[in-house]
Amino acid sequence: MSQPHQNAPLDYLVAHIYTYQMGKVMEPALVREAEVFKTHLEEWRKTHMGQFVLIKGEAVEFYDSLTAAFSAGTKRYGLDDFFIKQIIPRDTVNVSFMGKHLYQA
C-alpha cells in the first residue's frame, strides 16, 4: 500500500487506517470516530476550543492536554483503536522552521 501524502485530508488518512487481525484486513478503523468529530466540530469550537477530544465509537470526552487524553484512552481501551484530535480554529496557520516556532495566526 502506498504512503499517503503528508498534507492529505483527514478523510483520506482515516480511510487508509485498517485493523489487522491474524493477517486479514478488517473494517477500516476510526471511520465512525472521524465522522463524530466532523459532525460536532463547529459546536465543539464554541465550547471546547484548544482541548483534545477522545472519541471511541460514540463516547466522547475532552481533555486539556494530549498526554491526558492519551493516558485516559489507553487506560480505558488498552490496545484498541481510539481517536484523539485537538479542537482548533478553522483558519489556524502555524509556521516553523527546523523545529523552531516562528508564527501562529
Image: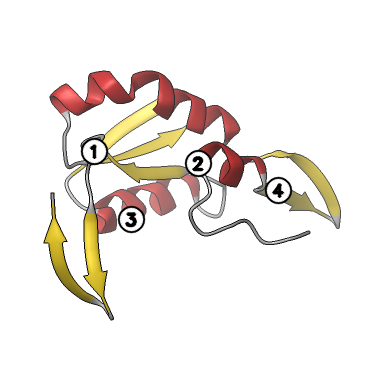
Disc 1 to disc 2, C-alpha distance: 16 Å
Q: Is residue 79 left or right of residue 54?
A: right
Towards the viewer: 11 or 75: 11
Q: Is residue 22 above or below residue 56?
A: below
Circle 3 or circle 1, nearest the eye: 1
Q: Quadrant of residue 62?
A: top left
SS category of the residue bearing label 2: helix
User: Which residue is under mark 2?
Assistant: 10
Q: Which mark is residue 71?
A: 3
| Quadrant of the snapshot with the N terminus | bottom right
Residue under the point 21% across and 36% down = 89
Disc 2 to disc 4, C-alpha distance: 17 Å
Residue under the point 20% across and 27% down = 45
Residue under the point 59% across and 33% down = 31
Label 4 CA crowd tier, 10 Å (few <14, some 14–19, many 20+)? some
SS category of the residue bearing label 4: strand
Q: Amino acid at mark 2?
A: Leu
Q: Using the rendered image of the protein, determine whether residue 5 is visible from the camera's viewpoint.
A: yes
